[in-house]
Image: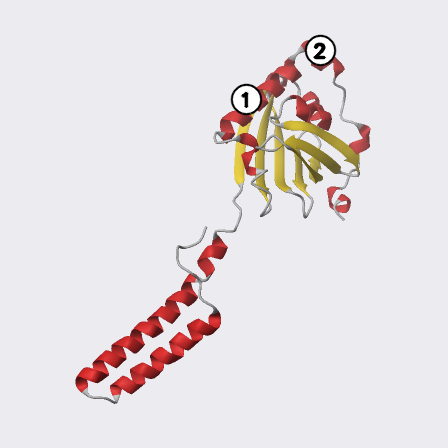
Amino acid sequence: MGTGRTERPPTMRLLAGVTGGALMLYGFQQSAFRGTVLSALGLALLARSLTCFTAKSQPQASKRHSSTEIHADILVQASVERVFGFWTSFANYARFLTHVLSVTDLGHGHLCWQALSPNGMPVEWEAVITKFVPKQELAWMSVPGAVVEQIGTVRFQALPEGATRVDVHLTFSSRPGAAGQGRGFYGPDTNRQLEADLRRMKALIESKLMLKSLGAVSTAWRGFDPISARR
């Protein structure tokens, strides 16, 4: 959105400034009444040219796209090994994350995300694992140039009696021209919707069927170096 005023070309602003300054100097050399009028007119032109220069940057600032940060945490009655194993089986994300259609492990620390945009159209982007600390932390971010700019961090805290606290931070934004695809995934009440997602995740992990099917963390991730994967 603009400022409500028409932006003048730089040459017109420069001409107005020069003319205003010249009128002020000429007015100082004239009689009292005539000089006052000319000086006032010159001052007005000079001020107008400076105002136009100042207003130039305002429309550009409005073009910047905002981001949405989401945070929620939950207590899961399962060991940290099982909870971390669930989160590193990326196909599970579509089972509890709102609007996510699939997350595919492409290998070498890269993930392909597919989700529904606010207008119901499928959106796809690639992300890379940036941090992988078994039973402690998992993080990822979109690759440069992705339609959806996404940063995700999940931290795991082992608690007494075999429980695990899961702490999730997500940031979504979209590049200019992408129609806010990233911002709209969680709607207006972002944290509450993420909390609902985590409750679904909790139910999946705590169910006896899921506990039987979960194994240890995949050996494919042992020795994974997120820094080299981003190169």
Residue 199 shows in the view: yes
Q: Can you identify the residue that label 1 sits on?
A: 196
Mark 1 surroundings: few (<14), some (14-19) or many (≥20) residues within 10 A:
some
Q: In the image shown, does 202 or 20 lie closer to the viewer?
A: 20
Expressed as whole percent of the image width and height from the top left, the position of residue 203 reads 61, 15
Q: Residue at position x 69%, y 34% from top?
A: 113
Q: Can you identify the residue that label 2 sits on?
A: 209
Q: How far apart are marks 2 and 1 (CA)?
A: 21 Å
- Mark 2 belongs to which amino acid? Leu
Q: Is residue 219 above or below residue 26?
A: above
Image color mode: secondary structure
**Left or right: 89 with respect to 13?**
right
Q: Is residue 43 above or below residue 91?
A: below
- Mark 1 belongs to which amino acid? Ala
Mark 2 surroundings: few (<14), some (14-19) or many (≥20) residues within 10 A:
few
Expressed as whole percent of the image width and height from the top left, the position of residue 93 reads 67, 26
Residue 29 falls in image quadrant: bottom left
Residue 161 falls in image quadrant: top right
Q: Residue at position x 23%, y 88% from top?
A: 30
Expressed as whole percent of the image width and height from the top left, the position of residue 117 reads 60, 33
Q: Mark 1 falls on what kind of element? A: helix
Residue 80 shows in the view: no
Expressed as whole percent of the image width and height from the top left, the position of residue 92 reads 70, 23
Report the mark closest to the observer, 2 or 1: 1
